[in-house]
Amino acid sequence: MPVEQTNDKVILTHPKGASAEILLYGATVISYKIAGDERLFVSSKAALDGSKAVRGGIPVVFPCFGPPSHPDHMHLPQHGFARTSTWKFDSIVMDNNAGVSVKLYLVPTPEIEKVFDKPFALAYVVTLAEHQLSTDLHVTNTSTQAWEFQALFHNYIRAPADEVTVSPLSALSYYDKTESSDEAKKTPKVEQRYEVDVKKTTDSVYEAAPGKYKILWPGGGLDVRTTNFKDVVVWNPQESGKSMSDMEEGGWKNYVCVEPGHVRGYVRLDAGNTWVGQQVLEPKL
Ligand code: BG6
């Protein structure tokens, strides 16, 4: 069956062998396999029961990135509520040899309204093709006034952290969050390297980035192509990952987070309008 639904997740299977699993909790893609290999990292200690955001896969970050910085976002938790809300299955969008695609949605619940009072509708379309996985976030302003948000896909790409590089990032302006988590108080640096590594603790927010990235390591790699995400975050905590209760021992050695987003400044969305942010992940085979 190309699309299988269980109580808590949706499983996509492509006729040529690729597969993906999406938890309704957070609309988190928790598995993407192609050619028999898992391409995402999920900590073996990650909670998958809806008790906290998943440590791994592709958490959806909305409507704020990191600690809230916008006056309308002050009641939100770090990275917003999308990753910790239970989404609903909407429909099968496509089911043929070109791809298998499903749509999930999230609208305000009483819990969300307590922390974010802007009327919205989110739709999330996940499409599995023979050689790639794409995720599209549709944000609709269902109110009568404009409001602002940030959005990001928090991709945990399975990769050897001591050997992986991310490029091209040279000459970009970036904020180094390892020095201070409060970006507003910092002056940006300019990236001198074409290929960035994460051999030491890395938490960098690149602005006005190219939108297409190569993640490479000896014997493997993955391309990320994005639309409407002008920024990208590269994160790996290295040894400081030990302090996360849901990170498996040594887990930080097995991934790099490459997170396309709109996280410097905000997207302003007029009443009745829809914004779409998209990414395509294409593993090297
Ligand atoms: C990254 C941030 O996107 O997410 C980091 O840049 C943060 O600063 C990391 O530590 C993980 O966040 P969380 O909330 O999932 O522990």
Image: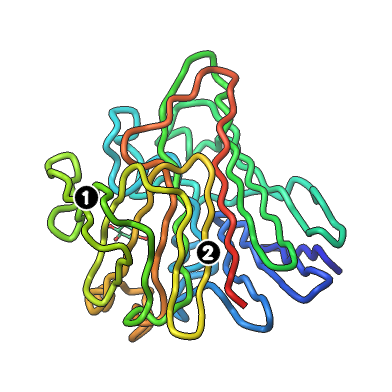
Picture coordinates of residue 113, whole percent (x, y): 47, 33
Instruction: Write the residue at 52% across / 49% down.
Output: 226
Q: Residues within 10 Å of mark 1 (few under 14, many from 20)?
A: many
Q: Is residue 18 above or below residue 135?
A: below
Q: Secondary structure at mark 2?
A: strand
Mark 2 belongs to which amino acid?
A: Asp
- Is label 2 within 8 A of ligand 1 (CB to nearest ligand atom)? no
Picture coordinates of residue 95, whole percent (x, y): 85, 56
Disc 2 target residue: 223
Q: Residues within 10 Å of mark 2 (few under 14, many from 20)?
A: some
Q: Secondary structure at mark 1?
A: strand
Left or right of 247, for residue 6: right
Instruction: Write the residue at 52% across / 36% down.
Output: 110
Mark 1 belongs to which amino acid?
A: Tyr
Disc 1 target residue: 175
Quadrant that contains the C terminus: bottom right
Instruction: Write the residue at 74% across / 52% down.
Output: 102
Q: Is residue 173 above or below residue 219?
A: above
The first of marks 2 and 1 along the sequence is 1
Left or right of 149, for residue 94: right
Instruction: Write the residue at 31% across / 69% down.
Output: 236
Where is residue 108, by image quadrant? top right
Left or right of 121, for residue 193: left
| Ligand 1's quadrant | bottom left
Where is residue 22, by image quadrant? bottom right
Mark pair 2, 1: CA separation: 23 Å
Picture coordinates of residue 248, whole percent (x, y): 38, 82
Of the pair 7 and 56, the residue shown nearer to us: 56
